[in-house]
Each structure stands twice: as C-alpha cells, then as structure tokens.
Image (cartoon, coloured by chain):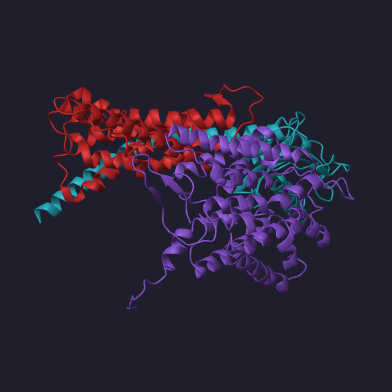
Amino acid sequence: MSKKATLAREYVKGLWEQNAVFRQVLGMCPTLAVTVSAINGIAMALATTFVLVFSSVIISSIRKLIPSQVRIASYIVVIATFVTIVDLVMKAQFPELSKALGPYIPLIVVNCLILGRQEAFSSKNPVFRSFLDALGMGTGFLVALFLLGGIREIFGNRTLLGLQILPNFYEPWLVMILPAGAFLTLGLMMGFFNTMSQRKKRLEHQTIIQQHLKPQKPALASDGEAN
Amino acid sequence: MAATTTNPTYKLDLTSSPHVHSRWSTKQAMWMVVFALIPSIISAVVFFGFYQLLIIAVSVGFAVGTEAAIKAIRKRPITIMDGSGIITGLLLALILPPNFNLAFTAIGSVVAIGIGKEIFGGLGYNIFNPALVGRAFLQASFPVPMTTWTAPNYTVDAVTTATPLSAFKFDKVAADLSDLFIGNIGGSTGETSSIAVLIGGIVLIGAGVVNWRVPVSMIAGILVFGGIFYFIDPAAYPNPVFHLFAGGFLFGALFMATDWVTSPLTSKGMIIYGLGIALVLVIIRLFGGLPEGVMYAILFMNSFVPLINRYNRPRVFGEVTK
Amino acid sequence: MKTVIHMLITLTIIGVISGALLSQLSGWAAPKIAAHRKAETEKAIFLVQPNADSYEKIETVDFELYKVFDENKEAIGYALPYEGNGFQGKIRLMVGVKYDLNELVGLEVLEQVETPGLGTKVTEEPFTSQFNKLIADPNVEWVKGAEPSNPNEIQTITGATISSKAIVQIVNQGLDKLRASLKTGGEL
C-alpha cells in the first residue's frame, strides 16, 4: 500500500489481513472447484502462486515501459504466458495431478487474484515489494485452499493428504466432496472468521472506550449490538 | 406473522415484517401443525413399525437441542418452546426412509436447524425450509441409505422395496392407486399414506393455520402439467392422479410448501409459487435422473420467494399506477 | 500518434518474447505429453487384455480400435476405447473383448465425472471385474438388487443404477459398432 509499510508487512498482510479467499473473496472459481482434497488445494495454490509471483516481478519491472492504455492487455499476455508454462510443465512432469486439476490450471489466467494484484500493486510498486506482496498473497491463498481442501477431505473421505484420519465407523459425508460441500464449508469458514475478527474489533473498541471513560462515570454497557 | 425476537437491551418485542393479522399466535399455530402431523405419525408406525418413533424422537431431540445450543452461544433468549424446532424435527423424521440410521438422523436434524435456520438468524429469517435442507444434506451425503426403502408391513410382495415412483421410472410399473392412497407402499415414513396426510392438511387449512392457495395451486398444477404429458403419451408418462398420490407430493404440498416463512405473502404470489413447484416437480419426475423431486422442487421455488414477493407487492392505499 | 506507436511496440515485444518462450517450452514438453498419453492407452489395453503381449492400432476403421496378440503373435481379441453419456457427463471406457466378439475379457473406465463416492464405484472392484469373462451375446444385460442369473448379466451398484446402466449401454453400443464394421469390412 503506502510506501511507509515495512517490507515484512508487504508479505504478512496477504496471509490474513487481506487474505485473498477469506477477506477479499477473490479467486472463487479454483477455490470452490478443486478443493476436494488437500493435495489438490495445495497444487492449485502452488501453481497460482508461481504465476502470481513471476507475473508480479515481470510486470513490476516493466511497469514504467507499458503505456497505461494497453496495460491490461500486457498483463494478460504476461499472466497467460506463465499459466501456459505451468500447464505444460504439469502435463509433462505430473500427469496425474494435471488430470485431477483438469481445466482449472488454464483457468488461472482469469483468476481475479492475479490480475487484481497486478493492477493494484505491482504496477505501482518496485520489484522487491511486488515480489513480497505476490508471495504473501500466494501463501494466504495456499493456507485457505489447504484448509478448505483439508476439511472437505477429512469429512468427505476420512483422510487428510491420503492418510486416514477418521475411523472406519465414520460414514463419509459425500456432500463435502460435492460442489455443495465447497460452498457450505467456505461459507461456514468465512462466517467463523468474520465472527472472530468482529469480536476482536469489539473488544478493542471497548478497551478504548473504557480508557476514555475512566476519569468519568462507569462505562456504559455496550453489549446491545451483538451483530 | 413472523418470529418474535426479544432484544436483550430493551424491553420491547421486535418482529420482522410482514405483520399479518392471524387468528393464531405463532406459538399456537406451531402446535397446531404438530397436532396435524399425528395421523402421519400413526401411519408411519402402522406401516413401518415402532422403530419410526425412535427416529422421530432422535430427530426432534437433536433439532430442539441444536436450537437451544445455538441460541445459548449467541446469547439470545432460548425460544424452543415456540414449537418450530419440534416441527422441523418431526417433518424431517417423516420424510426419511423407514428404519433410517439414527446417527444420520441426528446429523440431518443438526444441519436442518443449524444451516437451514439458525445461520440465517433463526425463525423468520430462513430462506429455505429447514427440514428440507436437512434432508437435502442427507441425500447428498448418504445417498445409499437415503434410497434404501423397507417394504411396508402389509405388503403382498415382500421382496419389492422400490418406491412406486422409482418402479415407474426405471421399470414402467405403475402402482395400485388404492395402495397409494392408504399408504401401503415403499417410501418415506410419513409420506406414503395420502389419507393420513390429507386429514392433517385439511385440519390445518380448516383451522386457518395454513393458506389453502399453496396446496390447491400445487395440486391443480400437477394435474394440469402431469396431465399434458399423459395426454401426449399415456404409455410413457404416468397418470396425473398417480403423480398426485405418489411420493411426497401431498406431504410436501400441505406441510412443506406452506411453511409461513418460506412461502410468498400475497394470494397471487402463493398461486405462482404453487404452480412453480408443480411444474419443476413434473419436469424432475419425468425427465430428471431422480425418480422423486418434491424436495428439490420446493427448495428451488423457496429461492424465488423473495422475487415473487417483490413483484406482487400489494399496492399502497392511494398509490397511483404510472 | 506517438502513443499508438508506443502501444504497438510494447505489445509486439511482449507478444514476441512470450511466444518465443512458449514455443521453446512446448518443444520440450510435447513429446513427453505424447509419451504419457501413449503409456496410458497402453496400460489400459494390457489391463483389459491381460493375456496380450503386443497390440497394433487398426487404421481401417473410423474409430479408435486396437487388435491385441498373444506371445505367439496370434490375434486374441480387441481393445476398444468407447465413450457415451453417464449420469453427469461423458464416460470413456476401454473394453477388452475376445476375437469372436462374444466374450468380454476386461473393462477399464478411462474418464468419468460421476458423483464421487457413488457413481465412481463403477470404476472400482467388484463392479469392473463383473465384466471379466462376461458373455456379450447378444448383448450385455443388467439386473438390479439381485445376483446375476445369466452369463450375460451384471449387477448394478445400489444407489448408482444410472451410472451402472450407462456403462452397460456404452459397452453394448461399442460392441454393436465393432460388429457392424466387421460385417462390412470383413476381417479387421
């Protein structure tokens, strides 16, 4: 964001504060579609991070050479190049994984997360900062997809990363590995994280209010607005 | 007519709109529904045995427990005595297959209340019928137990366990209409006996608890839409009367689609909604991959209710049409 | 005018660099990808024709077909990749059939998008092994909820009747096509 932010901050903000999935709700297509298992989520997030980091570095380094009228077109060409690289390498080296992720690898091109970061960050910031920002966003995406894929895999298939976690008497909830399970899990997780951060915010506000009210009369209870 | 929630800060009852005048309070009406379900509970026991009572107990127990737990976590007044949790539990138990696994019943009940109702803010705010949400979750999670039908007690042909709808869909065997009417057929516990469902439904309509427009337009709709296909090709498509009495249609029409919260407010809206359910249902039954689709048809039309309400808003007194 | 030229030059340079990079990469990846495809087909052929020693692609028909031979170079049957509609999308099978086209030797599901955990059971044992030594004369039939009583019957999977029936249908269609082209084209 602003130039004042420390370098560490550029990386850390993507992990949680501006998490691509839970906070910005970007890149929903791969998030919902491929997270039937933890390994799929990890692979997808790594592929996306690769594209994101390289595109950010390239675009940041040529940002002053691109006329603003064709910037989106240029970004897309750069992004598409890296996506094609990932796709070809995966098909050649990891055919099984490539089959599991199917059309979603080529679809990284249209992941709003990637184009969004180019437009919002790399096109205005120096190379190293863009690199950290992209890496942070990618890591956040990885965490989110791993959580989502992991939860769905545990409940839908008893396993995590292929290892059996839940006992045999647990009947897998097939809905979790169906598309409906993706929406349910993501919705519940977002709801949970929102509640947590709201609670944190409310407590912070309360302490501030308390501090300011201290010299005067006892603080008013502010429990009324729970939502 | 929607739920009453008490704001903890002020001693003032806040209710969500619309505020429709009714003979009954929410609580009274809810208990009327429970009362109207008694014939269906009896038919479930008669045709499928006493084990069904256990399913009902588990379903109701977990529904009420989940509601109380969520209210407690959210520090809201515990409103389980308004009867809505009990109804959700009862309805869910009655639309499950006979002798269904109790653990799965409990899961369905928790999902019905948790995801179907409380996550939206509780009674009055939910978009979808909670019992159907629970069943849809179970259907997607445990498809094999959810389609394993035990033959009813008084069956002649003890081997057959297919529901009349799936028998027709996959083998083109039409069931006997009198069996369909009485309920001596395979199917979800509370749905098989059309007569028991009708008794309860007529009590509800007569008492003014539910509006007649939804069930009547659904029945008219299925007779017309089913009739059109029957008229085109009687060999390939079933008789519309079969549509009416088979599967969960009547149960859905009288107890599910009429849910106050998830059905439209205006008379015209109710008719559109009822016809819509019938049309979607006929399409699913005749052309879908599944033999039965009352659940999906109602859930599908539930999602249109806000839209139907929006376009059928009663005109404000004195308003001039442009 | 200056901006237009600037725009054109920038886009051209980016395009050329990207194109050059990708063509280099593709030159490296294409043979590998082709090799994977071939290995996959080969694996499927030997899975559905366990006694096969070698195979050759038949070029005289307008669909994909492989003739398989045992170690004495004698033709023992065919491996036929064939696809059709499943419950939710295309199912692609590899069907192994004896030389007389009346007995199946194996079945392998190559691609499917059936419901996970339910329809996907058609890709697993014991469903697939039912097609081993199955008589396909005149056609493969299915029974529901009971043990098969005839040599040309398989049992459908409970809860996945549509997927199971789809497999039977695809097998029958594939065999019909094979028989029809045998009739018109003589010995393949």
Q: Which quadrant would the N terminus of chain A be assigned to in this image?
A: top left
Where residue C82 appears, as percent x and y from the top left, is 66, 47
**Of A193 and A226, which appears nearest the observer?**
A226
Choose between B219 and A109: the one closer to the eye: B219
In this orientation, which residue lies closer to the viewer: B169 or B206?
A: B206
**Colour of chain C as rendered:** cyan
Whether residue B190 appears in this view of the structure is no
From the viewer's perspective, is residue A148 above or below residue B82? above
- In the image, taking residue A100 as reference, residue A19 lies left or right, namely left
Count of picture labels: 0
Q: Is residue B107 left or right of residue B316?
A: right
Colour of chain B as rendered: purple
x, y percentage for residue B312?
44, 68
Q: Point out the image quarter for the C terminus of chain A.
A: top left
- Which chain wears red? A
Instruction: Describe residue C70's horizontal placement relative to residue A100 as left or right.
Output: right
Image quadrant assignment for residue A148: top left
Q: Position of residue B2 (x, y in %)?
A: 47, 53
User: Residue C147 is drawn in which quadrant?
Assistant: top right
